[in-house]
């Protein structure tokens, strides 16, 4: 347990306390805060972190708050924006959100005995003095645009108030956007390799799900929850997830071979604050678990064949009225007879129709797409579930977007997007999602559609024409889409899911009309979209060349001959022959033919990404087959 007096520590400076004198007084009252860091988020979701001594910051707070600091734009991910001959990027503090203190719990300040801290200030990136760039700026502008356009749509289509607990536009003081994420992650003791069969068996038996934590995992989890409470994150729950195996208690009294999946949840905030919160929470989680000798990974699929880590993202829209009441704009005025209002139905339809171009912002890595495969409660189909009846809320875990409702609590009505993972860029996920929602709301309201009309639209069969949704697809199912549809049916009804990052980003070319929704009011410009596309493609190519191909070679080398020819039986010899042939096909070149891994590398060198993508898909299938063959081969050896 950390031996610090939390009551004496500064954890955050709230958004309403960013006056110059108040900041000065706060920092002087907490000499353990030694540094200031302006945190900008580039187009790839990476955050900046620089150590500015507090004394330098205090010399001219006004200048820092107005002008921030300058960085070389070539050192952050802003391709096609910050070029070598025009790389000036300023990092400008955002005074509208909370500022959090990043504590170095391993380094006590000699003067106060409290951990040395860095005040991290969420910031906007500005290129060439006047162009806001990066993920935070995109989300800021997307939310601003959503609020403005939604108010205008409601004013121009007043029939919508017949289906809301609001009399007219004049009652509304402000549109409020709310969002929250759920964080899943794996923890383990360093250098321990996963036993895939044990993990898979434990998962099938549900031996770990919501079980009592023990040892260092319990201590670290409890400490994380208590510390995050100090930040004011309003923690709701921490628990074991489905993945993991029982740790071993060594003779020394220490736990070893820890391999567990955990989840923590906290309450919602405004959209940009929710993304900032998640960014800081990850740092706290990683730091605390490391203090107990445990590694944390936020990868979406750190272990093949076992459940990956998701980050379900909740999104809602409400109106704050002039009399102080809060009204959920997704919830209908007749809650017992209808699922949603026209605003809610339109928003959901916008998400589903435009998900082809949202998905590149959600799943932008190989790791993310490795998680999105049938059989692991990860969504693979663009489909929603509303519930069998309005008085029986549903939590269908097989759909992409779930409608979350609570009987008697209209403020709880929201959407749960189930495809993001802990490494998704939440800023861009939210920005793209809300702009897609706005497209659907606009279509529904301008067509004058009532809730019953929109329920029929979203429940249509494949082949039925609709005023907004695409004819060839269906969008709602109350069934288990993994077990009650074949793969062919899923592809036909819901659209074929991309298998690689390249296939996913190609949606920008396949659906140019859908891409237009992001360009409203220049929230995302052509340059922004081109920058994001280049960043994702470059990252995919680099990871494939520098990490996935070498790691696959390591897998091939690990699948080595394990039997003694004199003691082997024909089953062993035949099994090894199959494995040996597959290893050669994957990783050994001959004078006559290049192996599969070499052909992938050659395709990347030639910038033939389509071929590289096809070969990568084949490689993943064959490596899975190799691992299965090798496990069966080893099982038969004494």
Image: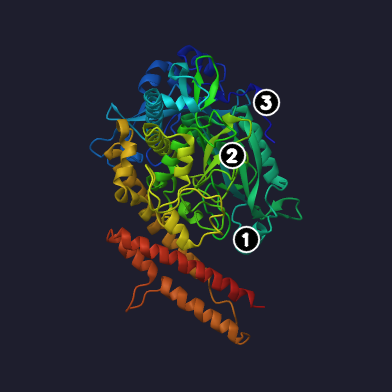
Residue at (48%, 46%) from the top-left corner?
Answer: 459
The answer to whether mark 2 and mark 3 are in CB contact below 8 A is no
Is 301 placed above or below 422 here? below
Q: Could you say which is closer to the camera, residue 243 or residue 573?
A: 243
Q: Could you say which is closer to the camera, residue 128 or residue 200?
A: 200
Indicate the quadrant containing the C terminus: top left, top right, bottom left or bottom right: bottom right
- Inter-mark Cα distance, 2 to 1: 37 Å
**Which of the 4 quarters of the picture holds residue 109?**
top right
Residue count near mark 3 (Cα–Cα under 10 Å), binned few <14, some 14–19, many ≥20: few
Which of pointers 2 and 1 indicates the residue nearer the eye? Answer: 2
- Give coordinates of residue 137: x percent, y percent: 38, 31
- Give coordinates of residue 540: x percent, y percent: 38, 53
- Give coordinates of residue 477: x percent, y percent: 52, 50
Horizontally, residue 325 falls left or right of residue 540, namely: right
- Give coordinates of residue 447: x percent, y percent: 37, 34
Which of pointers 2 and 3 indicates the residue nearer the eye? Answer: 2
Residue count near mark 1 (Cα–Cα under 10 Å), binned few <14, some 14–19, many ≥20: some
The answer to whether mark 2 and mark 1 are in CB contact below 8 A is no
Q: Could you say which is closer to the camera, residue 523 or residue 94?
A: 523
Label located before the other in sequence (2 or 1): 1
Residue at (42%, 58%) from the top-left corner?
Answer: 492
**Can see residue 53?**
no
Per the image, the residue denoted by label 2 is 390
Q: How is the image coloured?
A: rainbow
User: Which label was assigned to residue 200?
Assistant: 1
**Can see residue 342?**
yes
Assign a secondary structure to mark 2.
loop
Label located before the other in sequence (2 or 3): 3
Assign a secondary structure to mark 3.
loop
Please give the count of numbered marks on the rendered protein.
Answer: 3
User: Which label was assigned to residue 5?
Assistant: 3
């Amino acid at each position: 347990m950390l031996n610090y007096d939390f009551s004496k520590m500064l954890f955050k400076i709230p958004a309403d306390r960013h006056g110059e004198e108040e900041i000065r007084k706060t920092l002087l009252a907490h000499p353990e805060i030694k540094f200031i860091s302006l945190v900008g988020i580039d187009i790839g979701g990476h955050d900046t972190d620089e150590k500015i001594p507090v004394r330098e910051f205090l010399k001219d707070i006004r200048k820092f708050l107005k002008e921030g600091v300058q960085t070389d734009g070539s050192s952050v991910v802003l391709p096609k924006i910050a070029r070598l001959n025009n790389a000036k990027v300023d990092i400008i503090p955002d005074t509208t959100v909370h500022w959090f203190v990043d504590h170095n719990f391993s380094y006590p300040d000699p003067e106060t005995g409290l951990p040395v801290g860095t005040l991290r200030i969420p910031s906007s990136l500005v290129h060439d003095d006047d162009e806001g760039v990066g993920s935070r700026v995109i989300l800021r502008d997307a939310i601003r645009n959503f609020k403005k356009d939604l108010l205008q749509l409601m004013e121009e289509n007043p029939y919508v108030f017949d289906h809301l607990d609001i009399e007219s536009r004049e009652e509304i003081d402000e549109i409020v956007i709310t969002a929250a994420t759920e964080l899943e992650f794996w923890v383990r003791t360093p250098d321990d390799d996963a036993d895939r069969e044990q993990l898979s068996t434990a998962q099938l038996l549900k031996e770990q799900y919501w079980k009592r934590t023990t040892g260092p995992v319990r201590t670290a989890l409890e400490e994380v929850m208590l510390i995050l409470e100090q930040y004011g994150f309003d923690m709701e729950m921490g628990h074991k997830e489905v993945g993991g195996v029982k740790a071993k208690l060594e003779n020394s009294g220490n736990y070893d071979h820890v391999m567990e999946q955990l989840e923590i949840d906290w309450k919602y905030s405004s959209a940009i604050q929710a993304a900032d919160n998640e960014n800081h929470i990850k740092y706290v989680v990683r730091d605390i678990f490391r203090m107990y000798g445990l590694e944390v990974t936020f990868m979406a699929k750190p272990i093949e064949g076992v459940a990956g880590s998701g980050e379900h993202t909740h999104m809602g829209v409400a109106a704050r009225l002039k009399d102080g009441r809060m009204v959920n704009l997704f919830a209908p005025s007749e809650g017992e007879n209808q699922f949603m209002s026209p605003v809610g139905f339109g928003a959901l339809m916008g998400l589903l129709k435009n998900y082809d171009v949202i998905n590149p912002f959600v799943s932008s890595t190989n790791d993310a797409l490795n998680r999105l495969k049938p059989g692991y409660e990860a969504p693979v189909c663009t489909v929603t579930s509303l519930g069998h009846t309005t008085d029986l809320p549903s939590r269908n875990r097989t759909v992409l977007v779930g409608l979350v409702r609570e009987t008697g609590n209209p403020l709880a009505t929201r959407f749960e997007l189930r495809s993001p993972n802990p490494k998704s860029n939440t800023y861009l996920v939210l920005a793209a999602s809300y702009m897609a929602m706005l497209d659907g709301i606009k279509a529904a309201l301008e067509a004058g559609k009532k809730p019953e009309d929109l329920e029929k639209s979203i429940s249509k069969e494949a082949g039925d024409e609709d005023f907004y949704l695409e004819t060839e697809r269906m969008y709602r199912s109350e069934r288990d889409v993994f077990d009650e549809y074949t793969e062919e049916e899923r592809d036909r009804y819901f659209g074929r899911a991309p298998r690689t990052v390249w296939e996913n980003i190609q949606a920008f070319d396949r659906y140019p009309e859908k891409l237009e929704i992001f360009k409203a009011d220049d929230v995302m410009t052509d340059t922004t979209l081109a920058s994001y596309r280049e960043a994702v493609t470059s990252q995919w190519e680099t990871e494939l060349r520098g990490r996935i191909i070498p790691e696959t070679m390591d897998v091939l080398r690990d699948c080595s001959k394990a039997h003694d020819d004199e003691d082997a039986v024909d089953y062993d010899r035949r099994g090894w022959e199959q494995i040996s042939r597959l290893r050669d096909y994957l990783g050994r070149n001959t004078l006559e033919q290049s192996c599969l891994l070499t052909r992938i590398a050659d395709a990347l060198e030639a910038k033939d990404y389509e071929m590289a993508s096809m070969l990568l898909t084949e490689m993943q299938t064959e490596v899975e087959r190799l691992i299965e063959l090798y496990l069966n081969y080893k099982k038969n050896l004494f």
